[in-house]
Amino acid sequence: MDDARTDARRRFDLLPSVDVLLRSAPFQTLVSENGATAVRDAARDVLTDARARIAGGALAEPLSDPQALARAVETRIAERLAPAVRSVFNLTGTVIHTNLGRAPLAAEAIREMAAAAAEPSDLEYDLETGRRGDRDARVEAQVCRLTGAEAATLVNNNAAAVLLVLNTLAQDREVIVSRGELVEIGGAFRIPDVMARAGARLREVGTTNRTHPRDYAGAIGDQTALLMKVHASNYAVTGFTAAVSEADVARIAHEAGLPAVCDLGSGTLVDLERYGLPHEPTPGESLAAGMDLVTFSGDKLLGGPQAGIVAGRADLVDRIRRNPMKRALRLDKIILAGLSATLRLYERPEFLAEKLPVLRMLTVPEAEIAGRAERLAGPVRTAVAGAAEVDIVACRSQIGSGALPVDLLPSRALALTPHGGRKAGGKVEALARAFRRLPRPVAGRIAGGALLFDLRCLEDEAAFVAQLGALDLSDGAP
Ligand SMILES: *Cc1c(COP(=O)(O)O)cnc(C)c1O
């Protein structure tokens, strides 16, 4: 026992101290590149790990070589200094993928966001009078023009928009919602929970599959603050169903002197049918149907940065703006710049499908995607040679983020099937991992024993091909 301990002590002593390491040649290079602080911190970490491994029985010599330690420290520094958000290729086939950052932004939006980040701006400054201005005013005017709303207000995301509307208009009172619309969307947004946090009481009416006008009318009492509709975001109720239209809910609310509110979730500012896509409700339609307020996201179908938009009746929007919570949920200047630039694209709709990436990706002709598949099959085949077959297959892409959950767009994918056939389940996982470990990770989806790369969203083919040489299939791959 004592012998073993002395032995471990002796092996520990072979490890250099941090100060000695920092004076060695390989570390001097690291220090000149990263500064002494980061190198010292990383070196401490690496030495602590080495000691733990020696205590676990590892030999000290391989762990004490300054060159090897310098490489380990360099890797550690790179890990620590890696950006929190990395660019990936979204080849999952879901265009607006919440886990992959939703909408990629238009070039104009990115330019204006960079300018807003880099330079002082007239964010809350009236250039005519030299006095204080309102940060939201110009974007609100854009929203009004694009939706036909009397007024609008802007917050951090659509969840915040719903929270703020309910807290302002329904605190300590009841909100009537159909049981068929009590949705949970990804990331823990659940209507009943948001309602509770807003201080409102949920009054459920109808059943999961059927709700009738009389259900709403019968639930109205002196505690009722408003009637609410929630767009069935990421699921569809089919079969024996009945829902009450926005127009009917609005009429029932107004007969009782109450407002009607609609959480559209995605909401798009253009008629998607014009682009050959399935219909998705627009805020303008909801307001025209009689809804007093609508809420929707900035970074779903709208294709802008993360934001929540409340639009509708001026008197209600005014009360919402004056809620102190609004200040806590307000938009950042960079987001305002990006949202404004994105909305400006809608004010010139002739160029929208070309300039707004979300719409461009949703409307790219199938023949164009097929061309990408033809061009990329060869390079991908070379990259995975000996490990997997590569075929071009027909597939269907999804819009994502809750919009049009059951509508799928015809597309093309490269299907990478590991040699060894369909039972090679672990192999396809390893193949997917190898692509996720590329300098710009590639995210696909696994289906039927193959790794599918849906090419609908791959606009930069050259960048995709350029890094294929770095694919490393040695780690548990086929
Ligand atoms: C997406 C969605 C939300 C939440 O919107 P965020 O912008 O993600 O906060 C709320 N309600 C519905 C119906 C949605 O689809």
Image (spheres, helix red, strand yellow):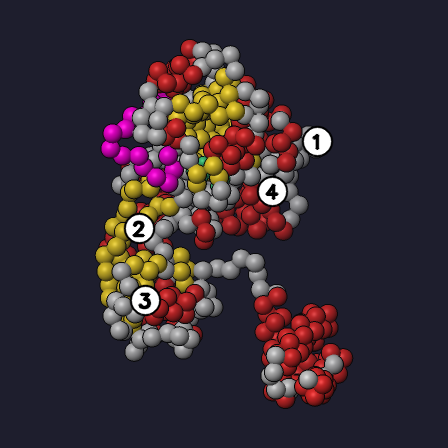
The residue that mark 2 highlights is 397
The residue that mark 4 highlights is 333
The one nearer the camera, 218 or 462, is: 218
> Local crowd at mark 1 within 10 Å, few (<14), some, or many (≥20)?
few
* For the residues bearing labels 3 and 2, Cβ distance under 8 angstroms: no
What is the spatial separation of the Cα atoms under label 4 and label 2, in whole angstroms? 34 Å
Residue 286 percent location from the top left of the image: 39, 26
> Mark 2: which amino acid?
Ser
Name the dominant secondary structure of the magenta segment. Answer: loop
Start-end of magenta stretch = 232-247
4 vs 1, front mark:
4
> Local crowd at mark 3 within 10 Å, few (<14), some, or many (≥20)?
some
4 vs 3, front mark:
3
The one nearer the camera, 67 or 155, is: 67
The one nearer the camera, 431 or 300, is: 431
The residue that mark 1 highlights is 131
> Mark 4: which amino acid?
Lys
